[in-house]
Amino acid sequence: MTRPFEDSGTQNSSAAPSRPPAQATPSRPAAQSRPAAQSRPPAPSHPAVQGYRAAQGYPAAAGSAAALRSERPAPFSLRPDPEPLLINLARGYLETMAGAREPEQLARWLSDGAYRRLLKRVVLASRARAVTKRAAVMPTIIVDRVIVTEPNEGVIEAVVILHSRVRTRAVAVRLEGRGDRWRASAINVM
């Protein structure tokens, strides 16, 4: 299973151990390498690399957390409708807590603090499943309704009511506008 935020691992030809070139056989042609002009180094996605780059005065990458935090909020009308994101975040959060989804799949829509809280909750939930010897299963979730309010410009607070076989849950979500998109700064399951 591939993870959505992993780099494909482009390799630098100078760092690879030297081997004789592969012999072409009639059933399989020799592998062709990409020209050096088309290859690119992997993006610095590790927080330590990003912090070092920021300390050295490099500009923040376009999709990095630092660049998103520095963007000014855009008017509500320029951002997409928050309801589909709220539904997907609430459903994804419960699936992650059930062990059926990886937390990295929600990382792009969560602030740093919300993502750290999610990771802590996932560890606790996985320990609880291990103690009770329950397997991680994909929960059946039905969305009942979404209640959305806008307390301030560029801020959405919503409650998503979800039904599963076992119980009904309310998921409270706070979205903050960054540029032309929404990011969840808090998610609480009741």
Image (cartoon, rainbow, N blue to C red):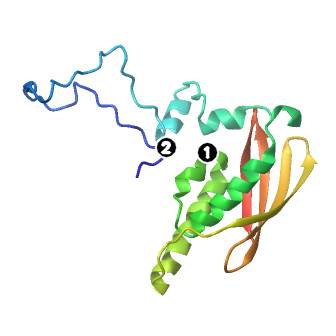
Q: Position of residue 140 (x, y in %)?
A: 63, 69
For mark 2, does the 10 Å Cα neighbourhood hold few (<14), some (14 to 19), or many (20 or more) residues? few
- Compare marks 2 and 1 and give the one earlier in the sequence: 2
Please tell me whether mark 1 sits on a helix, a strand or a loop: helix
Please state which of residues 3 and 43 is positioned toward the viewer in this rendering: 3
Figure check: 119 above or below 58: below
- Mark linked to residue 5: 2
Q: Position of residue 7 (x, y in %)?
A: 42, 38
Number of labelled discs?
Answer: 2
Q: Quadrant of residue 63?
A: top right
Please state which of residues 110 and 71 is positioned toward the viewer in this rendering: 110
Q: Position of residue 134 (x, y in %)?
A: 48, 81
Q: Residue at x 44, y 43 (%)?
A: 6
Q: Residue at x 52, y 36 (%)?
A: 50
Q: CA distance from mark 2 to mark 1?
A: 9 Å
Marks 2,1: beta carbons within 8 A: yes
